[in-house]
Amino acid sequence: MHPALSARLDSGELEITGRLLQASNVTLLTTLSATAEGRAIECVYKPIKGERPLWDFPDGTLALREVAAYEVSRAGGFDLVPVTVLVDGPLGPGSLQAWVDVDEEGADDLVDLVPLTALPREGWFVAVEGFGVDDTPIAVVHADHDRLRLMAAFDALINNADRKGGHILASGGSVFGVDHGICFHTEPKLRTLLWGWAGQEFTAAERACIERAAAEAPPALRKLLAEEEVEAFLDRAARLLRTGRFPSPHRNDHRTVPWPPF
């Protein structure tokens, strides 16, 4: 099992070692030392006090949603989200997530930015078309990859409002999704680059993950989300299983694609 899926983050001393400046909320690199495993673990710590207010999500809830996404991933057997827990860290309560060592070359095998002249590209879907700084026509594309396909099903289930290319990580033969602070809204908010399978039928394995998550995740979710958000999660699961297909973006709705895409 990948270390990011087996890390124990429930004990140890947390030390801040850096900050990810490109993040919109305070996102800190940390080291968890003196753990039960007897080794230091690199982590990402997001304190609640560092969250910027959003007009459509309740204040002070993004860290809770990060943990909720992990609980759904774990319960359903998606295994797409690194171990994520709530902690009372150096800057107060927040989420703590196991760090993922990224295969830099592997990321380009999942999501890429290419000139339109390079299309069509076998085994890839076009997510967004636009223009570069020199007005060259370009496109964001994503691979027809089994783990990305499972991530698209996962995002539909948790109502992920921000699946950018930069939130998809390749590591050690695995694929991970991070940054799940704006998920689980009661209203439809799905914004993603992973629309390549829209309208296609779920595989038996994808259905099984959704079914397990719906059956096993709610006890943990009720400690993290409002009751109406848990009920909306269950309603989405039921709808996805009833239709048996990946959702499609609403026509003429730019909000179904995140911006910027990376």
Image (cartoon, rainbow, N blue to C red):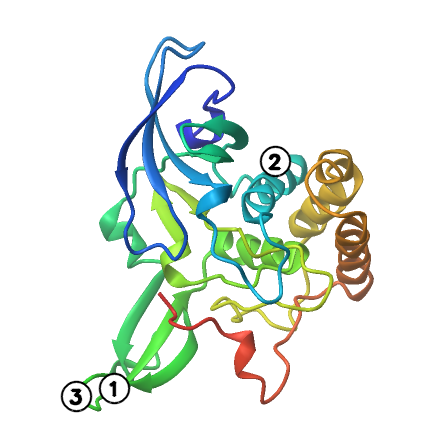
Query: Helix or strand or loop: what does disc 2 sit on?
Result: helix
Residues under numbered marks 1 and 3 in contact, where contact means CB atoms less than 8 Å apart: no
Measured in 3D between alpha carbons, the distance from the residue under mark 3 to the one under mark 2, in whole angstroms, is 44 Å
Viewer-proximal residue among 89 and 214: 89
Answer whether residue 201 is visible to the viewer in this image: yes
Q: Which of marks 2 and 1 is in front?
A: 2
Viewer-proximal residue among 59 and 148: 59
Q: Nearer the viewer, mark 1 or mark 3?
A: 3
Residue 194 lies left or right of residue 130; in this view the side is right
Give the class, few, some or many, for how many residues have Cα within 10 Å of label 1's Cα (few <14, many ≥20): few
Point out the image quarter for the C terminus: bottom left
Residue 230 lies left or right of residue 138; in this view the side is right
Q: Which of marks 3 and 2 is nearer the N terminus?
A: 2
- Inspect the image, locate mark 2, and give the three-letter code of the amino acid beneath it: Arg
- Inspect the image, locate mark 1, and give the three-letter code of the amino acid beneath it: Thr
Measured in 3D between alpha carbons, the distance from the residue under mark 2 to the one under mark 1, in whole angstroms, is 41 Å
Decide: is 209 above or below 35: below
What residue did someone put label 1 on? 117
Residue 209 lies left or right of residue 18; in this view the side is right
Query: Helix or strand or loop: what does disc 3 sit on?
Result: loop
Q: In the image, residue 218 lies at what x, y percent?
A: 77, 39
- Inspect the image, locate mark 3, and give the three-letter code of the amino acid beneath it: Asp
Q: In the image, residue 196 lies at what x, y percent?
A: 51, 71
Q: Earlier in the sequence, mark 2 or mark 1?
A: 2
Q: Earlier in the sequence, mark 1 or mark 3?
A: 1
* Residue drawn where x is 72% and y is 67% of the image: 187
What residue did someone put label 3 on? 134
* Residue drawn where x is 80% and y is 62% of the image: 239
What residue did someone put label 2 on? 74
